[in-house]
Image (cartoon, rainbow, N blue to C red):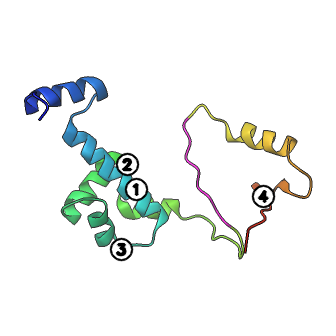
Amino acid sequence: RLGYSVRQVERQVFAELGAGPLALARAQRAQTARTLIETTALPMTELALASGFGSIRTFNDTVREVFALSPTELRQRAKGKPAAAGALVLRLPYRKPLCPDNLFGHLVATGVPGVEEWRDGAYRRTLRLPH
């Protein structure tokens, strides 16, 4: 027990975060759904339930409202070129004002010859993995 009413806790959460508990939970479900849409091949029904939505309709409506795209459009947009055999593709989200060109320019300038390279729009680095 906190010693506060539900309403008081909701007001404090809103004052600190700019959104109420229900809006925060909805945003978290939407973000989880987006991550699963873009990184898995799960059917949309399973994905909706795994993201915490109670129904497909709520899932579809929320994703459309939050991201201005349908779940199918999000998945299609996320599909890129398939990875080459033996390649590992990483998706690294970032916030502006990071400039990827400057970052990769620095990696190229300070790269170890024979270990790191920038070619064909891709940064490559060899790794020694334990077997």
Circle 4 residues within 10 Å: few <14, some 14–19, many ≥20: some
Q: Amino acid at mark 4?
A: Arg
Left or right position of 83 against 3 = right
Q: Residue at x 77, y 62 (%)?
A: 127
What separation in Å lies between label 2 and label 1 (alpha carbons)? 9 Å
Q: Quadrant of residue 27?
A: top left
Left or right position of 103 against 116 = left
Image quarter of the C terminus:
bottom right
Left or right position of 54 against 91 = left
Image quarter of the N terminus:
top left
Left or right position of 16 against 119 = left
Q: Is residue 68 visible?
A: no
What separation in Å lies between label 2 and label 3 (alpha carbons)? 19 Å
Disc nearer the start of the sequence (4/3) = 3
Q: Amino acid at mark 1?
A: Arg
Q: Kindly state the secondary structure of the residue where label 1 is placed.
A: helix
Q: Kindly state the secondary structure of the residue where label 4 is placed.
A: strand
Magenta-highlighted residues? 88-95
Q: Amino acid at mark 3?
A: Pro
Q: Residue at x 39, y 72 (%)?
A: 42
Up the image or down, 130 lies above or below 91; here it is below
Q: Position of residue 40 (x, y in %)?
A: 46, 68
Q: Give the numbered dot on residue 67.
A: 2
Q: Does the residue at mark 1 contact the one at mark 3 (Cβ under 8 Å)?
A: no
What separation in Å lies between label 4 and label 3 (alpha carbons)? 32 Å
Q: Which residue is mark 4?
A: 124
Q: Which residue is mark 1?
A: 34
Circle 3 residues within 10 Å: few <14, some 14–19, many ≥20: few
Q: Residue at x 17, y 26 (%)?
A: 11
